[in-house]
Amino acid sequence: MEGFDTFIGANGDIYCGSWMADLKHGSGRKSFANRDFYEGQWRQNVQEGHGHYLWRNGNQFIGEWRSGVIAGRGVLIWANGNRYEGRWENGVPNGSGVFTWPDGSCYIGSWSKDPMRQQQSNLKFYPIYFR
Protein backbone atom coordinates (compact mmCIF):
# COMPACT_ATOMS: atom_id res chain seq x y z
CA MET A 1 0.00 0.00 0.00
CA GLU A 2 1.00 3.59 -0.64
CA GLY A 3 -0.62 6.84 0.43
CA PHE A 4 -3.66 6.87 2.73
CA ASP A 5 -5.79 3.75 3.24
CA THR A 6 -7.58 1.55 5.78
CA PHE A 7 -6.51 -2.00 6.60
CA ILE A 8 -8.44 -4.55 8.67
CA GLY A 9 -6.24 -7.35 9.98
CA ALA A 10 -7.29 -10.98 10.39
CA ASN A 11 -7.11 -10.46 14.19
CA GLY A 12 -9.58 -7.55 14.04
CA ASP A 13 -7.07 -4.69 14.35
CA ILE A 14 -7.98 -1.72 12.14
CA TYR A 15 -5.43 0.81 10.89
CA CYS A 16 -6.47 3.94 9.03
CA GLY A 17 -3.70 6.24 7.90
CA SER A 18 -0.59 6.77 5.84
CA TRP A 19 1.34 3.94 4.21
CA MET A 20 4.70 3.66 2.52
CA ALA A 21 5.93 0.43 0.90
CA ASP A 22 3.16 -1.59 2.65
CA LEU A 23 4.20 -0.26 6.08
CA LYS A 24 2.39 2.15 8.41
CA HIS A 25 4.35 5.36 7.91
CA GLY A 26 3.27 8.91 8.80
CA SER A 27 0.05 9.81 10.63
CA GLY A 28 -2.47 7.13 11.46
CA ARG A 29 -4.99 5.62 13.86
CA LYS A 30 -5.06 2.01 15.00
CA SER A 31 -7.93 0.36 16.85
CA PHE A 32 -6.72 -2.90 18.37
CA ALA A 33 -8.96 -5.96 18.62
CA ASN A 34 -8.57 -5.80 22.44
CA ARG A 35 -10.17 -2.28 22.32
CA ASP A 36 -6.90 -0.36 22.90
CA PHE A 37 -6.42 2.62 20.57
CA TYR A 38 -3.42 4.58 19.23
CA GLU A 39 -3.38 7.76 17.19
CA GLY A 40 -0.18 9.43 16.14
CA GLN A 41 2.99 9.06 14.13
CA TRP A 42 4.31 5.82 12.64
CA ARG A 43 7.62 4.93 11.04
CA GLN A 44 8.14 1.63 9.25
CA ASN A 45 5.20 -0.05 10.99
CA VAL A 46 5.88 1.05 14.60
CA GLN A 47 4.93 4.06 16.72
CA GLU A 48 7.58 6.76 16.25
CA GLY A 49 7.22 10.42 17.23
CA HIS A 50 4.24 11.97 19.01
CA GLY A 51 1.20 9.83 19.77
CA HIS A 52 -1.75 9.17 22.04
CA TYR A 53 -2.35 5.61 23.31
CA LEU A 54 -5.58 4.77 25.12
CA TRP A 55 -5.84 1.42 26.91
CA ARG A 56 -9.25 -0.22 27.23
CA ASN A 57 -9.02 0.17 31.04
CA GLY A 58 -9.03 3.97 30.65
CA ASN A 59 -5.31 4.60 31.21
CA GLN A 60 -3.71 6.78 28.54
CA PHE A 61 -0.31 8.02 27.43
CA ILE A 62 0.25 11.20 25.44
CA GLY A 63 3.78 11.88 24.29
CA GLU A 64 6.80 10.61 22.43
CA TRP A 65 7.51 7.13 21.08
CA ARG A 66 10.70 5.56 19.70
CA SER A 67 10.72 2.22 17.90
CA GLY A 68 7.26 1.36 19.24
CA VAL A 69 8.17 2.09 22.88
CA ILE A 70 7.33 5.08 25.11
CA ALA A 71 10.49 7.24 25.18
CA GLY A 72 11.19 10.97 25.52
CA ARG A 73 8.70 13.37 27.10
CA GLY A 74 5.14 12.43 27.90
CA VAL A 75 2.34 12.04 30.40
CA LEU A 76 0.73 8.81 31.60
CA ILE A 77 -2.73 9.35 33.08
CA TRP A 78 -4.29 6.46 34.97
CA ALA A 79 -8.05 5.94 34.96
CA ASN A 80 -8.05 6.59 38.75
CA GLY A 81 -6.67 10.12 38.21
CA ASN A 82 -3.00 9.48 39.07
CA ARG A 83 -0.57 10.93 36.54
CA TYR A 84 3.13 10.99 35.79
CA GLU A 85 4.52 13.71 33.55
CA GLY A 86 8.16 13.77 32.58
CA ARG A 87 10.93 11.89 30.84
CA TRP A 88 10.65 8.25 29.74
CA GLU A 89 13.14 5.64 28.56
CA ASN A 90 12.19 2.19 27.26
CA GLY A 91 8.65 2.50 28.61
CA VAL A 92 9.51 3.54 32.19
CA PRO A 93 9.94 6.93 33.92
CA ASN A 94 13.59 7.98 33.75
CA GLY A 95 14.86 11.51 34.44
CA SER A 96 12.99 14.55 35.69
CA GLY A 97 9.27 14.19 36.30
CA VAL A 98 6.24 14.79 38.49
CA PHE A 99 3.87 12.14 39.87
CA THR A 100 0.54 13.67 40.94
CA TRP A 101 -2.36 12.12 42.86
CA PRO A 102 -5.97 13.19 42.22
CA ASP A 103 -5.97 15.30 45.43
CA GLY A 104 -3.09 17.40 44.05
CA SER A 105 -0.32 15.93 46.23
CA CYS A 106 2.78 15.17 44.20
CA TYR A 107 6.34 13.88 44.06
CA ILE A 108 8.74 16.04 42.06
CA GLY A 109 12.24 14.95 41.15
CA SER A 110 14.42 12.65 39.13
CA TRP A 111 13.30 9.08 38.39
CA SER A 112 15.42 6.05 37.53
CA LYS A 113 14.77 2.43 36.65
CA ASP A 114 17.99 1.64 38.55
CA PRO A 115 16.97 1.05 42.22
CA MET A 116 20.31 2.34 43.54
CA ARG A 117 20.07 5.61 41.60
CA GLN A 118 16.40 6.00 42.55
CA GLN A 119 17.20 5.72 46.27
CA GLN A 120 19.74 8.55 45.90
CA SER A 121 17.42 10.76 43.83
CA ASN A 122 16.11 14.13 44.92
CA LEU A 123 12.38 13.27 45.06
CA LYS A 124 10.36 15.76 47.08
CA PHE A 125 6.85 15.09 48.37
CA TYR A 126 4.35 17.96 48.41
CA PRO A 127 1.14 17.05 50.21
CA ILE A 128 -1.95 18.98 49.18
CA TYR A 129 -2.01 20.97 52.44
CA PHE A 130 1.36 22.65 51.62
CA ARG A 131 0.03 24.25 48.45
Image (cartoon, rainbow, N blue to C red):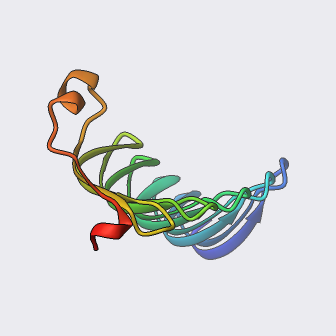
Quadrant housing residue 8: bottom right
Q: Quadrant of residue 50?
A: bottom left
* Residue 129 x/y as whole percent: 34, 68
Residue 56 placed where, x, y %?
Answer: 73, 58
Residue 110 is situated, as x and y percent measured from the top left of the image, at 19, 46
Note whether residue 37 is visible: yes
For residue 93, above or below residue 82: above
Q: Residue furthest top?
A: 116
| Residue shown at 40% from the left, 46% from the top | 67
State the residue in front, 19 or 51: 51
Which quarter shows the N terminus?
bottom right
> Which residue is depicted at the point 56% across and 65% down?
81
Q: Is residue 79 above or below residue 4?
A: above
Q: Quadrant of the C terminus?
A: bottom left
Along the viewing direction, whichever of 83 and 87 lies nearer the viewer: 83
User: In the rendered image of this protein, does residue 102 appear above or below residue 70?
Assistant: below
Task: Residue at 46% x, 53% y: name it.
Answer: 44
Instruction: Decide if residue 85 is in sight here.
Output: no
